[in-house]
Amino acid sequence: MHKEQGIEFDVSWLTGDGLPREHGLVLTRLLDALSRAASLRVAARAAGISYRFAWGLLGAGARTLGAPLVDMGRGRGAKLTPFGRRVLEADARVRSTLGEPFERLRNEVREILVEALPGRPRLVLRASHDLALGELARLCASRLDLEIEFQGADDSLAALAHGQCDLAGFHVADALPRAAAAAAALGRWLDPKKHHLVHFVAREQGLIVRHGSRIRSVHDLARPRVRFINKPPGHAAEADRANADLLVAAEVAEGRADAGFGLRAAAARYGLDFVPLATERYFLAAARNTLRGAGFQALRHALRSPEFGKSVALLPGYDASRAGTSESIPAALSWLGHARAGT
Protein backbone atom coordinates (compact mmCIF):
# COMPACT_ATOMS: atom_id res chain seq x y z
CA MET A 1 0.00 0.00 0.00
CA HIS A 2 1.27 3.47 -0.89
CA LYS A 3 -0.14 6.54 0.82
CA GLU A 4 0.89 10.18 0.98
CA GLN A 5 -1.04 13.43 1.18
CA GLY A 6 -4.43 11.68 0.76
CA ILE A 7 -3.29 9.57 -2.24
CA GLU A 8 -3.59 5.84 -1.68
CA PHE A 9 -3.34 2.73 -3.85
CA ASP A 10 -3.76 -0.85 -2.66
CA VAL A 11 -3.32 -4.27 -4.24
CA SER A 12 -6.77 -5.88 -4.11
CA TRP A 13 -6.34 -8.81 -6.49
CA LEU A 14 -7.93 -11.53 -4.30
CA THR A 15 -11.70 -11.32 -4.68
CA GLY A 16 -14.75 -13.36 -5.69
CA ASP A 17 -18.31 -14.34 -4.70
CA GLY A 18 -18.51 -14.12 -0.94
CA LEU A 19 -15.06 -12.50 -0.71
CA PRO A 20 -15.16 -8.70 -1.27
CA ARG A 21 -11.94 -6.97 -2.28
CA GLU A 22 -11.42 -5.43 1.15
CA HIS A 23 -11.75 -8.91 2.72
CA GLY A 24 -9.22 -10.26 0.21
CA LEU A 25 -6.70 -7.70 1.47
CA VAL A 26 -7.31 -8.79 5.07
CA LEU A 27 -7.04 -12.47 4.07
CA THR A 28 -3.55 -12.04 2.61
CA ARG A 29 -2.55 -10.19 5.78
CA LEU A 30 -3.89 -13.11 7.85
CA LEU A 31 -2.03 -15.67 5.75
CA ASP A 32 1.19 -13.70 6.18
CA ALA A 33 0.65 -13.68 9.97
CA LEU A 34 -0.08 -17.43 9.94
CA SER A 35 3.22 -18.10 8.17
CA ARG A 36 4.96 -16.89 11.35
CA ALA A 37 2.44 -17.75 14.12
CA ALA A 38 1.80 -21.04 15.92
CA SER A 39 -1.98 -20.72 16.05
CA LEU A 40 -4.88 -19.08 14.26
CA ARG A 41 -5.74 -17.11 17.38
CA VAL A 42 -2.27 -15.54 17.51
CA ALA A 43 -2.31 -14.83 13.76
CA ALA A 44 -5.78 -13.23 13.96
CA ARG A 45 -4.60 -10.95 16.75
CA ALA A 46 -1.51 -9.97 14.68
CA ALA A 47 -3.74 -9.24 11.67
CA GLY A 48 -6.01 -7.05 13.80
CA ILE A 49 -9.17 -9.17 13.41
CA SER A 50 -11.24 -11.45 15.63
CA TYR A 51 -10.74 -15.22 15.79
CA ARG A 52 -14.27 -15.76 14.46
CA PHE A 53 -13.76 -13.39 11.54
CA ALA A 54 -10.47 -15.15 10.71
CA TRP A 55 -12.31 -18.49 10.49
CA GLY A 56 -14.85 -16.98 8.13
CA LEU A 57 -12.14 -15.44 5.92
CA LEU A 58 -10.28 -18.73 5.56
CA GLY A 59 -13.49 -20.47 4.53
CA ALA A 60 -14.41 -17.77 2.01
CA GLY A 61 -10.88 -17.84 0.58
CA ALA A 62 -10.95 -21.62 0.17
CA ARG A 63 -14.29 -21.48 -1.62
CA THR A 64 -13.14 -18.65 -3.91
CA LEU A 65 -9.80 -20.23 -4.84
CA GLY A 66 -10.91 -23.87 -4.80
CA ALA A 67 -8.55 -25.32 -2.19
CA PRO A 68 -7.91 -25.10 1.59
CA LEU A 69 -5.44 -22.42 2.65
CA VAL A 70 -4.72 -23.63 6.20
CA ASP A 71 -4.30 -27.04 7.82
CA MET A 72 -6.08 -27.02 11.19
CA GLY A 73 -5.22 -30.54 12.40
CA ARG A 74 -6.19 -31.32 15.99
CA GLY A 75 -3.31 -30.79 18.40
CA ARG A 76 -1.03 -29.41 15.71
CA GLY A 77 -2.16 -25.78 15.74
CA ALA A 78 -2.59 -24.04 12.38
CA LYS A 79 -0.21 -23.94 9.45
CA LEU A 80 -0.45 -22.94 5.83
CA THR A 81 -1.12 -25.64 3.26
CA PRO A 82 1.18 -25.79 0.23
CA PHE A 83 -1.59 -23.99 -1.67
CA GLY A 84 -1.80 -21.34 1.05
CA ARG A 85 1.94 -20.72 0.70
CA ARG A 86 1.48 -20.33 -3.05
CA VAL A 87 -1.20 -17.70 -2.45
CA LEU A 88 1.28 -15.77 -0.31
CA GLU A 89 3.93 -16.10 -3.03
CA ALA A 90 1.46 -14.77 -5.60
CA ASP A 91 0.62 -11.83 -3.34
CA ALA A 92 4.32 -11.00 -2.92
CA ARG A 93 4.81 -11.17 -6.69
CA VAL A 94 1.89 -8.82 -7.32
CA ARG A 95 3.17 -6.31 -4.77
CA SER A 96 6.75 -6.36 -6.00
CA THR A 97 5.60 -5.96 -9.60
CA LEU A 98 3.19 -3.12 -8.90
CA GLY A 99 5.16 -1.34 -6.17
CA GLU A 100 7.30 0.83 -8.47
CA PRO A 101 4.50 1.74 -10.93
CA PHE A 102 2.22 2.59 -7.99
CA GLU A 103 4.92 4.84 -6.52
CA ARG A 104 5.44 6.56 -9.87
CA LEU A 105 1.69 6.97 -10.37
CA ARG A 106 1.26 8.34 -6.84
CA ASN A 107 3.90 11.01 -7.56
CA GLU A 108 2.22 11.91 -10.84
CA VAL A 109 -1.21 12.22 -9.23
CA ARG A 110 0.24 14.29 -6.39
CA GLU A 111 1.87 16.68 -8.86
CA ILE A 112 -1.38 17.03 -10.83
CA LEU A 113 -3.22 17.97 -7.65
CA VAL A 114 -0.66 20.29 -6.08
CA GLU A 115 -0.33 22.25 -9.32
CA ALA A 116 -3.99 23.23 -8.93
CA LEU A 117 -3.70 24.40 -5.32
CA PRO A 118 -4.66 28.08 -4.88
CA GLY A 119 -1.82 30.46 -4.08
CA ARG A 120 0.86 28.04 -5.28
CA PRO A 121 4.15 29.96 -5.73
CA ARG A 122 5.91 29.99 -9.10
CA LEU A 123 9.48 30.72 -10.13
CA VAL A 124 11.06 30.92 -13.58
CA LEU A 125 14.69 29.75 -13.74
CA ARG A 126 16.89 30.38 -16.77
CA ALA A 127 20.01 28.29 -16.37
CA SER A 128 22.96 26.59 -18.00
CA HIS A 129 22.47 22.85 -17.85
CA ASP A 130 23.48 20.78 -14.84
CA LEU A 131 22.88 17.15 -13.91
CA ALA A 132 21.49 18.11 -10.46
CA LEU A 133 18.78 20.46 -11.75
CA GLY A 134 16.41 17.59 -12.49
CA GLU A 135 16.56 16.44 -8.87
CA LEU A 136 15.92 19.99 -7.65
CA ALA A 137 12.81 20.22 -9.85
CA ARG A 138 11.55 16.88 -8.52
CA LEU A 139 11.96 17.93 -4.89
CA CYS A 140 10.24 21.27 -5.52
CA ALA A 141 7.21 19.70 -7.21
CA SER A 142 5.08 19.40 -4.08
CA ARG A 143 5.67 23.01 -2.94
CA LEU A 144 6.55 25.10 -5.97
CA ASP A 145 5.83 25.48 -9.67
CA LEU A 146 9.45 25.69 -10.88
CA GLU A 147 9.80 26.41 -14.61
CA ILE A 148 13.31 25.70 -15.92
CA GLU A 149 14.52 26.91 -19.31
CA PHE A 150 18.06 26.02 -20.36
CA GLN A 151 20.21 28.78 -21.83
CA GLY A 152 23.85 29.70 -21.79
CA ALA A 153 25.16 31.34 -18.62
CA ASP A 154 25.52 34.78 -20.22
CA ASP A 155 22.02 34.63 -21.73
CA SER A 156 20.56 33.52 -18.38
CA LEU A 157 22.16 36.45 -16.55
CA ALA A 158 20.95 38.84 -19.24
CA ALA A 159 17.40 37.49 -18.85
CA LEU A 160 17.56 38.13 -15.10
CA ALA A 161 18.85 41.67 -15.63
CA HIS A 162 15.99 42.38 -18.05
CA GLY A 163 13.33 41.00 -15.70
CA GLN A 164 12.54 37.98 -17.91
CA CYS A 165 13.04 35.40 -15.14
CA ASP A 166 13.22 35.15 -11.35
CA LEU A 167 16.50 33.24 -11.12
CA ALA A 168 19.55 32.75 -13.32
CA GLY A 169 21.74 29.66 -12.99
CA PHE A 170 25.38 29.85 -14.07
CA HIS A 171 28.73 28.28 -13.27
CA VAL A 172 32.17 29.77 -12.86
CA ALA A 173 35.50 27.97 -12.64
CA ASP A 174 38.39 28.64 -10.30
CA ALA A 175 40.89 28.56 -13.17
CA LEU A 176 41.88 30.93 -15.95
CA PRO A 177 40.72 31.92 -18.55
CA ARG A 178 37.17 30.97 -17.63
CA ALA A 179 37.37 32.87 -14.34
CA ALA A 180 38.06 36.12 -16.20
CA ALA A 181 35.21 35.50 -18.65
CA ALA A 182 32.81 34.75 -15.78
CA ALA A 183 33.82 37.91 -13.93
CA ALA A 184 33.16 39.98 -17.06
CA ALA A 185 29.69 38.44 -17.48
CA LEU A 186 28.80 39.04 -13.84
CA GLY A 187 29.94 42.65 -13.99
CA ARG A 188 27.94 43.20 -17.17
CA TRP A 189 24.61 41.87 -15.90
CA LEU A 190 24.51 41.81 -12.10
CA ASP A 191 24.23 44.74 -9.71
CA PRO A 192 25.71 43.95 -6.24
CA LYS A 193 23.21 46.36 -4.69
CA LYS A 194 20.24 44.64 -6.30
CA HIS A 195 21.22 41.00 -6.80
CA HIS A 196 22.30 38.19 -4.49
CA LEU A 197 23.84 34.79 -5.15
CA VAL A 198 22.74 31.41 -3.78
CA HIS A 199 25.03 28.39 -3.77
CA PHE A 200 23.74 25.41 -5.75
CA VAL A 201 26.53 22.84 -6.29
CA ALA A 202 30.25 22.59 -6.89
CA ARG A 203 31.52 20.14 -9.50
CA GLU A 204 34.88 18.89 -10.79
CA GLN A 205 35.83 19.70 -14.37
CA GLY A 206 38.76 18.11 -16.15
CA LEU A 207 39.86 15.59 -18.78
CA ILE A 208 37.72 12.55 -19.50
CA VAL A 209 40.31 9.95 -20.45
CA ARG A 210 40.27 6.56 -22.14
CA HIS A 211 41.73 3.67 -20.14
CA GLY A 212 45.34 2.95 -21.09
CA SER A 213 45.92 6.27 -22.87
CA ARG A 214 48.53 7.41 -20.29
CA ILE A 215 47.10 10.95 -20.32
CA ARG A 216 47.78 12.58 -16.94
CA SER A 217 47.78 16.30 -17.77
CA VAL A 218 46.87 18.74 -20.53
CA HIS A 219 50.48 18.57 -21.73
CA ASP A 220 49.94 14.94 -22.76
CA LEU A 221 47.32 16.08 -25.26
CA ALA A 222 50.14 17.39 -27.45
CA ARG A 223 51.61 13.93 -27.95
CA PRO A 224 51.49 12.55 -31.50
CA ARG A 225 48.35 10.58 -32.43
CA VAL A 226 46.40 11.63 -29.30
CA ARG A 227 42.80 12.17 -30.37
CA PHE A 228 41.10 14.97 -28.43
CA ILE A 229 37.45 16.00 -28.61
CA ASN A 230 36.32 19.35 -27.19
CA LYS A 231 32.57 18.85 -27.75
CA PRO A 232 30.65 16.54 -30.07
CA PRO A 233 29.32 17.98 -33.35
CA GLY A 234 25.96 19.69 -32.98
CA HIS A 235 26.34 20.31 -29.25
CA ALA A 236 28.16 23.62 -29.06
CA ALA A 237 25.43 25.37 -27.07
CA GLU A 238 26.52 26.36 -23.58
CA ALA A 239 22.96 25.72 -22.39
CA ASP A 240 23.48 22.01 -23.07
CA ARG A 241 26.98 21.82 -21.57
CA ALA A 242 26.32 19.05 -19.05
CA ASN A 243 24.61 16.91 -21.67
CA ALA A 244 27.48 17.67 -24.05
CA ASP A 245 29.87 16.37 -21.37
CA LEU A 246 28.00 13.07 -21.38
CA LEU A 247 28.31 12.91 -25.16
CA VAL A 248 32.05 13.62 -24.92
CA ALA A 249 32.32 10.72 -22.47
CA ALA A 250 30.37 8.50 -24.85
CA GLU A 251 32.76 9.38 -27.71
CA VAL A 252 35.76 8.45 -25.55
CA ALA A 253 34.13 5.27 -24.25
CA GLU A 254 33.34 4.12 -27.79
CA GLY A 255 36.98 4.63 -28.88
CA ARG A 256 36.48 7.61 -31.17
CA ALA A 257 38.69 9.85 -28.99
CA ASP A 258 41.36 9.44 -26.33
CA ALA A 259 40.32 12.40 -24.19
CA GLY A 260 37.96 15.35 -23.94
CA PHE A 261 36.96 18.07 -21.48
CA GLY A 262 34.03 17.34 -19.20
CA LEU A 263 32.71 16.61 -15.72
CA ARG A 264 33.99 13.87 -13.43
CA ALA A 265 30.39 12.66 -13.15
CA ALA A 266 30.25 12.16 -16.93
CA ALA A 267 33.51 10.17 -16.86
CA ALA A 268 32.24 8.01 -14.00
CA ARG A 269 28.98 7.25 -15.79
CA TYR A 270 30.98 5.57 -18.56
CA GLY A 271 33.65 4.07 -16.29
CA LEU A 272 36.44 6.23 -17.71
CA ASP A 273 39.53 7.77 -16.14
CA PHE A 274 39.52 11.42 -15.08
CA VAL A 275 42.18 14.12 -14.69
CA PRO A 276 40.89 17.01 -12.49
CA LEU A 277 41.69 20.52 -13.72
CA ALA A 278 39.27 22.90 -12.02
CA THR A 279 36.36 23.21 -9.62
CA GLU A 280 33.27 24.85 -11.01
CA ARG A 281 30.83 26.54 -8.65
CA TYR A 282 27.24 26.71 -9.79
CA PHE A 283 25.22 29.64 -8.45
CA LEU A 284 21.65 30.84 -8.66
CA ALA A 285 21.38 34.63 -9.00
CA ALA A 286 18.24 36.54 -8.01
CA ALA A 287 17.04 39.98 -7.03
CA ARG A 288 16.99 40.51 -3.27
CA ASN A 289 13.18 40.83 -3.13
CA THR A 290 12.85 37.41 -4.86
CA LEU A 291 14.83 35.82 -2.01
CA ARG A 292 12.21 37.05 0.47
CA GLY A 293 9.26 35.53 -1.40
CA ALA A 294 7.38 32.30 -0.70
CA GLY A 295 8.61 30.77 -3.95
CA PHE A 296 12.27 31.08 -3.05
CA GLN A 297 11.63 29.84 0.48
CA ALA A 298 10.17 26.65 -1.02
CA LEU A 299 13.21 26.38 -3.30
CA ARG A 300 15.61 26.88 -0.39
CA HIS A 301 13.78 24.17 1.58
CA ALA A 302 14.43 21.71 -1.26
CA LEU A 303 18.08 22.75 -1.60
CA ARG A 304 18.73 22.25 2.11
CA SER A 305 16.83 18.97 2.37
CA PRO A 306 18.70 15.73 3.16
CA GLU A 307 17.13 14.21 0.03
CA PHE A 308 18.87 16.75 -2.22
CA GLY A 309 22.21 16.19 -0.49
CA LYS A 310 21.90 12.41 -0.84
CA SER A 311 20.98 12.59 -4.52
CA VAL A 312 23.86 14.96 -5.36
CA ALA A 313 26.27 12.72 -3.43
CA LEU A 314 25.55 10.03 -6.02
CA LEU A 315 27.12 12.25 -8.72
CA PRO A 316 30.93 11.78 -8.57
CA GLY A 317 32.80 15.05 -8.24
CA TYR A 318 29.74 16.95 -6.99
CA ASP A 319 29.39 18.75 -3.66
CA ALA A 320 26.14 20.22 -2.31
CA SER A 321 27.36 21.05 1.19
CA ARG A 322 26.65 24.79 0.69
CA ALA A 323 23.42 24.40 -1.30
CA GLY A 324 20.81 26.98 -0.33
CA THR A 325 23.16 29.39 1.43
CA SER A 326 23.02 32.95 0.10
CA GLU A 327 25.80 35.52 -0.05
CA SER A 328 26.46 38.92 -1.54
CA ILE A 329 28.16 38.87 -4.92
CA PRO A 330 31.53 40.17 -3.60
CA ALA A 331 31.56 37.64 -0.74
CA ALA A 332 30.48 34.63 -2.81
CA LEU A 333 32.99 35.34 -5.56
CA SER A 334 35.91 36.62 -3.52
CA TRP A 335 37.88 33.54 -4.60
CA LEU A 336 37.36 34.58 -8.25
CA GLY A 337 39.61 37.60 -7.87
CA HIS A 338 42.40 35.35 -6.63
CA ALA A 339 41.93 33.07 -9.64
CA ARG A 340 42.06 36.04 -12.01
CA ALA A 341 45.26 37.24 -10.35
CA GLY A 342 46.74 33.77 -10.76
CA THR A 343 47.01 33.12 -7.01
Image (spheres, rainbow, N blue to C red):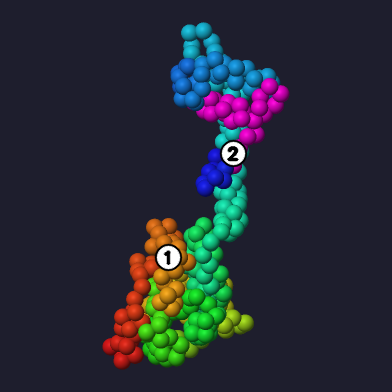
Say whether residue 250 is magenta: no
Which residue is at the front of the view, 253 or 202? 202
Q: Which residues are magenta?
A: 9-34
The residue shown at (59%, 42%) is: 9
In the shown orientation, is residue 285 left or right of residue 71?
Answer: left
| Residue 53 % position (x, y) | 56, 18
Amino acid tagged 1: Gln
For the residue labelled by badge 2, is the local secondary structure a helix, a strand or a loop?
loop
In the shown orientation, is residue 44 left or right of residue 93?
Answer: left
Crowd around label 1: few <14 · some 14–19 · many ≥20 (10 Å): some
Above or below, comparing residue 64 to residue 259 in the picture: above
On the question of residue 298 being in view, the answer is yes
| Residue that badge 2 annotates | 10
The residue shown at (41%, 70%) is: 292
| Residue that badge 1 annotates | 297
The residue shown at (46%, 21%) is: 45
